[in-house]
Each structure stands twice: as C-alpha cells, then as structure tokens.
Amino acid sequence: MADKFVNVPDAQGDAPAQALPQDFEAALGELEALVAMMMEDGSMPLESSLAAYRRGVDLVRVCQDRLARAEQQVRVLEGELLRPFEEAGD
C-alpha cells in the first residue's frame, strides 16, 4: 500500500529521477511511506537501499526548507503584530 506513494529511482540511474514534491505535506507523506517501506522490507538490495536513502535525504531537505520558510513568515507576522503594549495605543 505504501508503494504507491514511493518512487525509488532505478539503482543503475537509467530512469530519470522523479521530481521532488514542492509542498511540505506531499514531501512528508512520501518520506513516511519510504521509511515504512524500508522498515517492512529489510531485503532490499544495496543499490536500491542507497537510492531510497538519497531520495529520503532529498525529501527531508524539502521538508526542512518549507518549515524554515513557514518559520520566517511567522517571525514577520509576529514583528508586525506583536509590539510592546505602549506602542499599541499610539
């Protein structure tokens, strides 16, 4: 069931790599499915395991980037909305 969300690149590099999801939820979902697949099937060949690992690292980077962007947006909003009490009345 998890296999439908995970596309591990061909170990030989013959197939083009699937584009990374650009939103946090999709990247996290694929990462979770990849981890579940790796844990369920411990008999994956070394090259396939390495390809899955590389895909996982890329997915983690997408998630980290999206979280960093969200955190920056929150900081901007806090800077605009949260001011000392004295300034609020001015």
Image (cartoon, grey):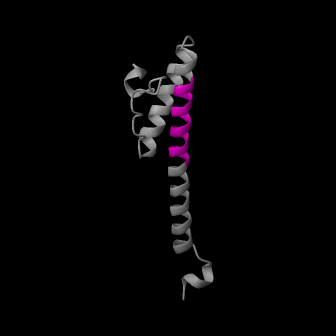
* Foreground of the two, 83 or 25: 25
Residue drawn at x 53%, y 13% as measured from the top left? 41
Q: Is 30 or 55 nearer to us in this picture?
A: 55
Looking at the rendering, the stretch of residues picked out in magenta corresponds to 50-64
46 magenta-colored: no
| Closest to the observer, 89 or 20 | 20
State yes or no: residue 58 in magenta.
yes
Residue 73 versus residue 10 in the image, above or below = below
Using the image, determine if residue 48 lies above or below residue 74. Answer: above
The residue most toward the top is 43
The residue at the point 45 percent across, 26 percent down is: 8
Extreme residue toward the bottom, this view: 90
User: Residue 75 location in percent, x, y?
Assistant: 56, 65
Image location (x, y in percent) of residue 30: 45, 32
Q: Nearer the viewer, residue 33 or 54?
A: 54
Quadrant of the rendering where the N terminus is positioned: top left
The prevailing secondary structure element of the residues shown in magenta is helix
Left or right, 58 with reference to 17: right
**53 relative to 23, above or below:** above
Looking at the image, residue 5 lies above or below residue 78: above
Q: Quadrant of the C terminus?
A: bottom right
Percent coordinates x, y for residue 59 in the rendering = 51, 38
Identify the image quadrant of residue 82: bottom right
Residue at horizontal 39 percent and vertical 33 percent from the top: 16
**Does 7 sit left or right of 39 as displayed?**
left
Q: How many marks?
A: 0
Query: 61 left or right of 18?
Result: right
Where residue 12 appears, as percent x and y from the top left, is 47, 23
